[in-house]
Image (cartoon, grey):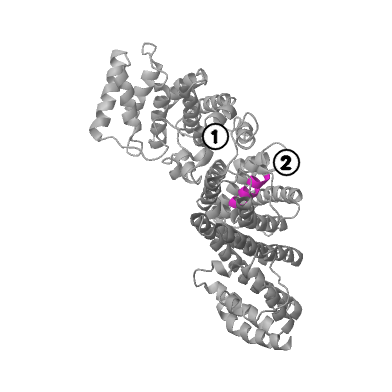
Amino acid sequence: MAKQANTLFLEDWLRSNSGGGGGGGGGGGGVNSAGNGPTSSSSARAIIQAWAELRDCLQHQSFQPHHLQSLKTLLNSQASLYVADPQAKLLISTLSSPNVSLPQESHPMFLRLLYFWVRKSFRPNPVLIDSAVEVVCGIVVSARFDSDWGRLVFAEGVLVLGAFSVVPAASDASKVLCLESICRLLEHGGALMRLYEGVIANVLAGIGYALSCPVNVHYDKFVSFLLGVWGGEDGPEINIPSGLMILHLIEWVISGYINSRSFEKIRLFSQIALENSEEKYVPYALSMAAGGVLRASNRLASRGAVLEILGLRSSAEDKMEYLASALISRMGDPGNFIDYPADRLLLQCLALSVARSGSLSSRAPFLICLASALMNEIFPLRRLYAKILDNSPSGSAGIRHSEVREHVESVLFKEGGAVTGIFCNLYASADEQNKALVENLFWRYCCDLYVGHRQLVLVFQGRDNNLLGDLEKIAESAFLMVVMYALAVTKQKLTPKHSKETRMEVSVQILIAFSCLEYFRHIRLAEYLDTVRAVLPSVQENESACVTFVESIPSYADLTVGQVRSVPSNSISESYMWIIVFDKLPDLFCIYSFVRIRVLLVHR
């Protein structure tokens, strides 16, 4: 991490891990698009010419319009540009010259070039570093933030001062000056981050550098700002991209502590951020910060300091458990939708934190929250079905489809596989009561999907096939999730330690769930076949189990007329209905079921 810290533009790394789109991930936070995506790199000749023109500016003590273009030329070459000490001295001298009248828009550009210098230089001159800190602090502290250029000075100021604070060549006095100046800038931070979301990545990166500074000045203020500024009237809006930047920022900071064996910093962060902070910080930010701690500790657990890492990890999981438990108490039935937007976002963030961290200790609130997240947020088909079928004016076709497409492309949906894997591991180590709870939630979810999707197809087939296509992408992934979970259930419940009745009930429920979602099985899946093979014997041994499964199939009337209200049907009355149904039954079950159903029909 130490070597990486000398070359990494932290704000770019945060953006790349934010999932794009939305508040923190968009452009507009840097100078002339530097750090905000691909730029058109200038040629070596153009770069040399730009430096020559800036030297001419200082020599003649006059800043002309073409000098602004020279700065832009340099900024457009972030990837290849190397700012050596002589060039840095030129920038500092120009900024500090009382005889050079610089336009406001040039200040953030100068700051960005100094940032290039301090992040790419292997061993910058200590005297030059201290001089640069003094000049930059003077500029940013006296800046007005009521203009676009002012907010760029704010964002670039936090970024470059944070970068200066972690340079080994800087004196302790300069580091303290950097940290104090950042604190003064952050007094305006919440409002500016709310008005100009594009600056969020730069501000977070600057705070990340400041938290990595070996001088522990204002450490608690930086943590408090990072975890407490979100939401409210004077803070930036809460959303997934910004939350992911918080997660990966904390990962970067904690990884640095672990690699440098900064145990005092680890204890300090844990005390301020994770212990006794329930009312001080925003739950949204806390959940992501805890996820960042877990991700760093999982990746670096083998690098010594086991006790310190285990203690930090335990504190992070305790915090996540507290947040999950409070959320469960508010949601009531975890199988139902959550209507309050902040709680929905918290549930999404908890799921993403788990997905990005890689593993989690077995605790009941984690299991229940992930079950709710999978059914209601990651694969939210029931919510989408209800919203689309709503006849209110707000449910126009364009809005419906855009929301579905947005979800298909979201980072939350793409992390569904990772969340499912961790959820299945948590299920395997849960107690019987919580296993039964989530089993019932999932079997109900599968039946609801069958009913909801069929109603939707009846309404929109031929009218909006694109909408149905995107919904089926979500449904296909939901089917895969259910298959993985069902396989985990068979490994836990279809064992000799469970009664024959339990094995039969679980087997029937799995077959019913599969039959509800069979329409979405588009690939040959080994886990699916393994699950069917595992449950067949339990059903075959018991005639009542087969009856239960058969009665779960909708009646012929429901299949051909009107809307299906529920999955269980009335008594079997039309023998030819099975020709229709069997085409959708699991492959291995078809032959067996056909024989059994013929017997049942004769008995009746």
Q: Position of residue 113 (x, y in %)?
A: 38, 29
Q: For residue 102, which quarter of the picture? A: top left
Q: Which residue is mark 1?
A: 207
Residue beneath the point at 58% across and 51% down: 352
Vertical placement of residue 185 versus 592, above or below: above
Residue type pointed to by label 2: Asn
Whether residue 299 appears in magenta in the rendering, the answer is: no
Residue type pointed to by label 1: Ile
Query: Over which residues does the magenta segment extend?
Result: 343-352
Relative to the observer, which residue lies in front, 517 or 324?
A: 517
Query: Which of the labelled discs sits on residue 595, or is there none?
Result: none
Q: Position of residue 443 (x, y in %)?
A: 68, 66
Q: Position of residue 272 (x, y in %)?
A: 67, 38
Q: Which residue is mark 2?
A: 276
Q: Residue furthest left?
A: 45
| Mark 1 surroundings within 10 Å by alpha-carbon count, few (fewer than 14), some (14 through 19), many (20 or more) | many
Residue beneath the point at 33% across and 22% down: 68
Q: Position of residue 171 (x, y in %)?
A: 49, 28
